[in-house]
Image (cartoon, rainbow, N blue to C red):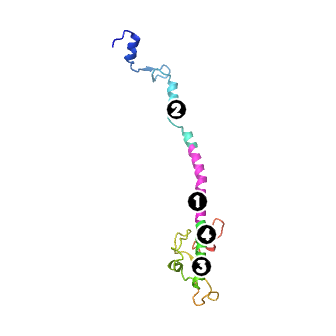
């Protein structure tokens, strides 16, 4: 393929680009690429990272957010445990009443409720994290249906902590 036009030939095979040379800067005596102004090189250098004050401001904002979020999260965990405790107490009290009505005597232990099929298992006390820390309140022998065997009348949490309302969990 022959081309007689010189412009066409340059489009097909362009001339090589001369190598980049560093030129001396008259002001500072430093070298500058492409003969550029050293101030423009300095301004490009500032775009590569953050200043110390910017990092400090970001860290302060993050610490303020964490200082408000962590206590709210912890309080929501306590509210969840309190809600679970109320639900477990309601269930245990209802099952104790049903057992007493059906058997004409109160259960002697919480395990009796499981053995007779009223519960799948003794619920967890969410405040203590155990199934063995429930405080059972036994009924008086005089007020029982079967006066020879007084049984469980009520159940309370085994925790000594106080609720968000200020009342002890052991009084719920």
Q: Do tag 2 and tag 4 residues touch (Cβ < 8 Å)? A: no
Going from N to C along the chain, the mark reached first, 4 or 1, is 1
Residue 141 at least partly seen: yes
Numbered disc in front, either 4 or 1: 4
Q: Residue at x 59, y 79 (%)?
A: 98
Above or below, 37 against 99 in this view is above
Going from N to C along the chain, the mark reached first, 1 or 2, is 2
Lateral position of residue 170 relative to residue 12, left or right: right
For residue 98, which numbered disc appears in the image?
Answer: 3
- Which residue is disc 4 drawn over? 86
- Which residue is disc 1 drawn over? 74
Question: As rendered, which of 95 and 48 lies closer to the eye?
Answer: 95
Element at label 4: helix
Magenta region includes residue 97: no
- Which residue is disc 2 drawn over? 46
Going from N to C along the chain, the mark reached first, 1 or 3, is 1
């Amino acid at each position: 393929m022959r081309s007689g036009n010189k412009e066409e030939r340059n489009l097909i095979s362009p001339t090589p680009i001369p190598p980049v040379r560093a030129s001396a800067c008259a002001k500072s005596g430093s070298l500058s690429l492409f003969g550029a102004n050293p101030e423009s090189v300095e301004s490009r250098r500032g775009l590569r990272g953050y200043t110390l004050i910017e990092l400090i401001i970001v860290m302060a904002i993050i610490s303020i957010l964490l200082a408000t979020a962590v206590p709210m999260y912890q309080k929501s965990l306590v509210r969840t445990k309190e809600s679970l405790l109320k639900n477990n107490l309601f269930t245990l009290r209802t099952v104790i009443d049903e057992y007493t009505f059906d058997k004409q005597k109160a259960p002697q232990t919480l395990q009796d409720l499981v053995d007779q099929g009223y519960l799948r298992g003794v619920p967890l006390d969410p405040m203590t994290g155990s199934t063995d820390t429930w405080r059972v309140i036994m009924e008086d022998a005089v007020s029982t249906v079967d006066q020879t065997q007084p049984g469980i009348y009520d159940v309370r949490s085994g925790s000594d902590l106080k609720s968000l309302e200020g009342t002890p969990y052991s009084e719920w």
